[in-house]
Image: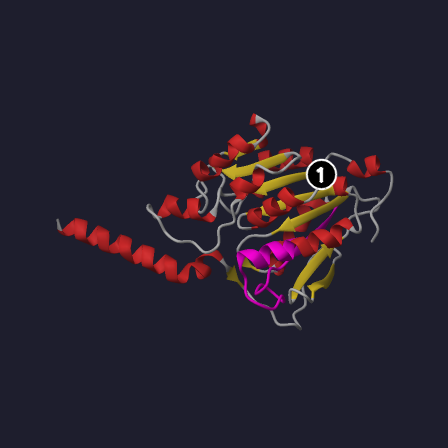
Amino acid sequence: MELIFILVGVYIIMVVGFYYFQEKFIFQPKPLEESYTFKFDLDFETFYLEDQEKQLKVNSLFFPSQSPTKGLVLYMHGNADNLQRWGRYAEDFHQHGYDFLSIDYPGYGKSPGSPSEEKCYQSAELAYHWAIRRYPEHSIILYGRSLGTGAAAYLAAQYPAQQLILETPFPSIPKLIRFWIPGFIKVRHKFPVEQYLKEVKYPVTIFQGTWDIVVPHRAALQLKPHLACEGDFISIEKGRHKNLRKFQEYQKKLEILLAVESIKKAGKEPIK
């Protein structure tokens, strides 16, 4: 009986703790000083995207590939750190001939403000509008990582692109939380990836590790019915939440996905 009371007490603490501190669980930004200088091995540009009406100012990193480029990978990063970490992933796409653009959501890196689901969507839209003015829609690849799968899936449900790639996605934040804390918990930030995928009109590919303890494999599997083909859900055996790029299976499949030379279909190069 005493053990039952202890377990109930722990459960109540977890529920109450998550409810009041959920922003700190969902968003884990690492701010940077305005004077901070990014350091990468590849050539890059940094600039701000702004929407004065929404009082939104988003710091961005752009890595140009060799000309002529195949197109652009618009990369929505995960819930922690800032662009100094996430910019390093540009090399995975740069080596295949794609330009790479990633942004810091409000509160992350040099982007002022505080993060929220709405602000993530607005930031993603700013980046997409920048991209569509410079690239044909069928040369834009939307790529979401972890929390960024919510923003990327939101874009894909609203706007045209060549394809959507999701790495370690979840069906929604409420459903993901229930994998760890059973029962009903009011979650203020939903990121309903599952719902957005129903509206996507072009190819979607998911990468998920079987040893992921942040987004369990069985949670990501809930997205599989919304994919067009069985092979669009790539399970990386023994893959964890942060290391899928180290697996040969991931790199081989990514190479295939990025081999589509959509820039030739457009008949012109992107405008820089």
Kindly identify the amino acid type of the residue bearing the numbered disc 1.
Gln
The boundaries of the magenta stretch are: 96-124
Q: Residue at x 46, y 44 (%)?
A: 215
Q: Is residue 247 above or below residue 18?
A: above
Local packing at callout 1 (Cα closer than 10 Å; few below 14, some 14-19, many 20+) is many
The answer to whether residue 267 is magenta is no
Q: Position of residue 40 (x, y in %)?
A: 68, 58
Q: Is residue 202 left or right of residue 120?
A: right
Q: Residue at x 78, y 37 (%)?
A: 262
Task: Kindly tell me whether residue 72 is visible in this rendering.
Answer: yes
Nearest to the observer: residue 119 or residue 2:
119
Q: Residue furthest front?
A: 53
Figure disc tally: 1
Q: Position of residue 166 (x, y in %)?
A: 58, 41
Residue 171 on image: x %, y %: 49, 42
Dividing the picture into quadrants, the one containing residue 218 is top left
Residue 168 seen in the current view? no
Residue pointed to by mark 1: 162
* Element type at mark 1: loop
